[in-house]
Amino acid sequence: MRGDAASRLAGEPLDSYSQDELMARIQVLEAEIARVKAHHAKAADHRQLADSLFKPRDTD
């Protein structure tokens, strides 16, 4: 993946983090997940629209 920060984060040791720091990290990650899901949905809608505009027409 391009600039796969998630993989780097997944490998980071968490032992030195306090409970508050872990909760803050969870909030940041959940916000990022929501952002990526929203972008994915937008891209899927755009793709569906493009497919509908450019699909071959039936010539019966």
Image (cartoon, grey):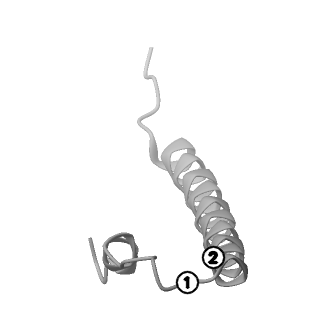
Q: Which residue is mark 1?
A: 17
Q: Residue at x 56, y 46 (%)?
A: 48
Under circle 2, the secondary element is helix
Q: Within 10 angstroms of label 1, few (less than 14), some, or many (20 or more) residues?
A: few
Is disc 2 in contact with disc 1, using a CB cutoff of under 8 Å?
yes
Q: Quadrant of the C terminus?
A: top left
**Residue type (three-letter) at the residue carrying disc 2:** Leu
Q: Nearer the viewer, residue 7 or 24?
A: 24
Q: Eyeballing the image, is 52 above or below 32?
A: above
The structure residue drawn at horizontal position 44% and vertical position 40%, both measured from the top left corner, is 55
Location of residue 26 with respect to 52 vertically, above or below: below
Residue lying farthest to the left in this orientation: 1
- Which percent across, then down, holds residue 46? 59, 58
Residue drawn where x is 37% and y is 77% of the image: 13
Which SS class for mark 1? Answer: loop
Q: Left of 59 or right of it: where is 46?
A: right
Which quadrant would residue 41 be assigned to in this image? Answer: bottom right
Picture coordinates of residue 45, whole percent (x, y): 63, 52
Marks 2 and 1, Cα distance to the nearest angstrom?
A: 6 Å
The quarter holding residue 15 reads bottom left
Q: Residue at x 62, y 73 (%)?
A: 32
Pointer 2: what residue?
Answer: 22
Could you say where residue 22 lies in the image, as x and y percent from the top left? 63, 76
